Amino acid sequence: MPRGKKRPLIEEDSEGVISPDAQQEKDVVPTIASPFTIIYKPPRTSNKRSSKAARRESEAQNVTSTLVEENPLGDGNDMVYSVRPPHEWATMKRFRNFMVAEETFTLDQYVYVNHSGIPHGEELSDANAKMFWIARVLEIRATDPEHVYIRVFWLYWPNELPDGAQAHHGEHELVASNHMEILDAMTVTGRAQVQHWREDDDDEVPAELFWRQTYDCQTHQLSIIRKHCTCEGYYNPDSMLVNCSNATCKIWLHKECILKDVLSRVYKQIVGTNEGGNEDTIEVGKPNARSKGKKASNATSAAENSDADPWEGVLDAKLVRQKTGRQQRVRVAVTDLRGGSGGNPPTKARRQSQDKPWLEDIHCLRCKEKIV
């Protein structure tokens, strides 16, 4: 995790809206650090009482008591922590909302946090969103407009994780964590639209920022996410998955695995014989994974192979949607890159020019049925 600025390693009885001191100059951004530090303690199993009720009780008994927060990882263990210095934190007034630059923020919202000194008032866009950190607001406390603090859970961009971004991480993907911190509210620069994507069969891929995986800052472990295809690889929502139409199968297949399967079959059919090769001796790469158009990233589907596939530079393929009446099916458009100097395309396509694509059916990589 990033170091040096503190980050990289709740509904309360509340009143009104607090605004951090608006007299700070627009181009001056306070440091991400605050005078408060969170100390983690061993987690404990959740009980019937809500973690908020447990926290209120502990604070009422003693300002130095341990505090409790529901763990966002959903593992059945509450987060147990304390805040230093305890008295200053416990005696501050709680609020439901706070305002920065005339924008109101509330509990449980996702917010952009300015950690790199970008002036307030800058417009946010998809292109520069990664210049900011993203957090979920758990608690708002203040003594006056000059001293407003928020307790947050951090979300991370995948490239900030210890092992960096993985092939299955999408362009708009975040990783939720149980890393808590207390920030100066003036570091908040805007509201972030973030969805929790559970990756169910019927779920549409979120168009905006989303998270599906969690990172435990205490064990340094990423949560397990759903595997797909015969390769048992993960799903990158910037690419595509194709669902087997066989009702007894219904596996989701990676686009990359499908293309590899079709290319190996076509290569063996039209190149192995036409270039004087012997079909028995052609070694065709086999998809390294398991199987209608659900969006998903390149590269997680097939196993990494240091040797180039034999069809590279000879054949090219892409998934296309073919509309027949009111129905659509996904097929593979194959192009012979050798043009007129190469071999013949399959018999059903010989009337086409050799530099134009023809369509191939997709067969499920598991049940072998044609996908319709």
Image (spheres, rainbow, N blue to C red):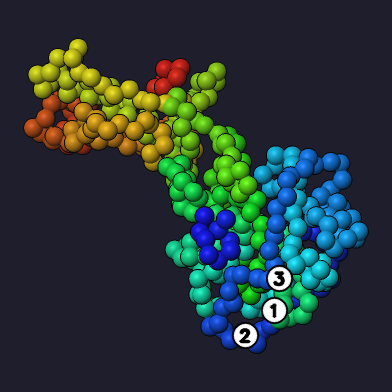
Residue 301 picture quarter? top left
For residue 149, which numbered disc appears in the image?
3
Residue occupying image coordinates x 39% and y 41%: 298
Left or right of residue 16: residue 313: left
- Nearest the viewer among 365 and 222 is 222
**Which residue is labeled 1 in the image?**
20
Residue 127, position in %: x, y? 44, 63
Residue 36's place in the image compared with 371, above or below, is below
Using a 10 Å C-alpha cutoff, classify the residue at mark 3 as few (fewer than 14 neighbours), some (14 to 19) or many (20 or more): many
**Which residue is labeled 2 in the image?**
24
Residue 104, position in %: x, y? 69, 72
Q: Considering the numbered disc 2 on the image, is that residue within a helix, a strand or a loop? A: loop
The quarter of the image holding the C terminus is: top left
The amino acid beneath tag 2 is Gln
Q: Give the mark, 2 or 3, whose residue is nearer the N terminus.
A: 2
Residue occupying image coordinates x 69% and y 48%: 72
C-alpha span from label 3 to label 1: 9 Å
Q: Considering the numbered disc 3 on the image, is that residue within a helix, a strand or a loop? A: strand
Q: Are marks 2 and 3 in contact (CB under 8 Å)?
A: no
For residue 303, which numbered disc appears in the image?
none
The amino acid beneath tag 1 is Pro
Residue 351 picture quarter? top left
Q: Are marks 1 and 2 in contact (CB under 8 Å)?
A: yes
